[in-house]
Image (cartoon, grey):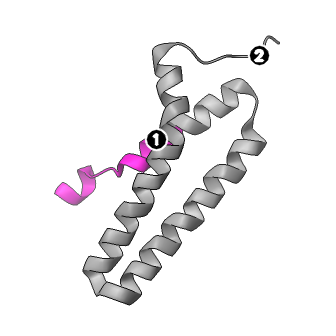
Amino acid sequence: MAGFVFVPPISLSSALFACGARIMGTVGREAILISALSVLELAGAAVGALSGGLTGLTLGWVAAIAVEVVVLAPMVWRAYRGRLEVPAR
C-alpha cells in the first residue's frame, strides 16, 4: 500500500518548474533543460547500477535527483514567494 502513496520529490519539483516556465512563456528553453536533467537522472541510475548493484542504482539516482533539485529549485522558490517575473501579454 505504501508504494501507491510514494511520490518522488523531483516529480513535484519538475511539474512546478514546468508550470512556471509556461507562465513565463519559456517552455521551449525549459523543456530542453528538463530533458537534459532527465537524461542525467537515467545516466546516474545506470552508472550506479553498474558499479554497485541495487544500492548503487539508488545512490546514483538520488545523486541525480539532488542535482535536479539544485537546478530547478530557485525558479520554483521565486514563484512560491511571488517574485516570478511574468511578461505582460
Region rendered in magenta: 1-15
- What residue lies at 75% left-to-right and 44% top-to-bottom? 29
Q: Secondary structure at mark 1?
A: helix
Residue at horizontal 47 percent and vertical 26 percent from the top? 77
User: Mainly helix, strand or loop, the magenta region?
Assistant: helix
In the image as oriented, which residue stretches furthest toward the right? 89
Q: Earlier in the sequence, mark 1 or mark 2?
A: 1
Q: Residue at x 69, y 43 (%)?
A: 30
Residue type at mark 2: give it: Pro
Q: Amino acid at mark 1?
A: Ser
From what the image shows, is residue 1 above or below residue 48? above
Q: CA distance from mark 1 to mark 2?
A: 22 Å
Quadrant containing the C terminus in the rendered view: top right
Whether 78 is drawn above or below 29: the answer is above
Quadrant for the N terminus, please. bottom left
Q: Residue furthest left?
A: 1
Is residue 6 part of the magenta span, yes or no?
yes
Badge 2: residue crowd in 10 Å (few <14, some 14–19, many ≥20):
few
Is residue 58 shown above or below 31?
below
- The image quadrant of residue 24 is top right
Residue bearing the label numbered 1: 13
Expressed as whole percent of the image width and height from the top left, the position of residue 26 reads 75, 34
**Res. 57 image quadrant:** bottom left
Numbered label attached to residue 87: 2
Task: Please tell me which residue is depicted at 61% across the width and 29% down the height of the picture.
Answer: 20
SS of the residue at dot 2? loop
Left or right of 70, for residue 60: left
Asked whether residue 30 is drawn in magenta, I would say no
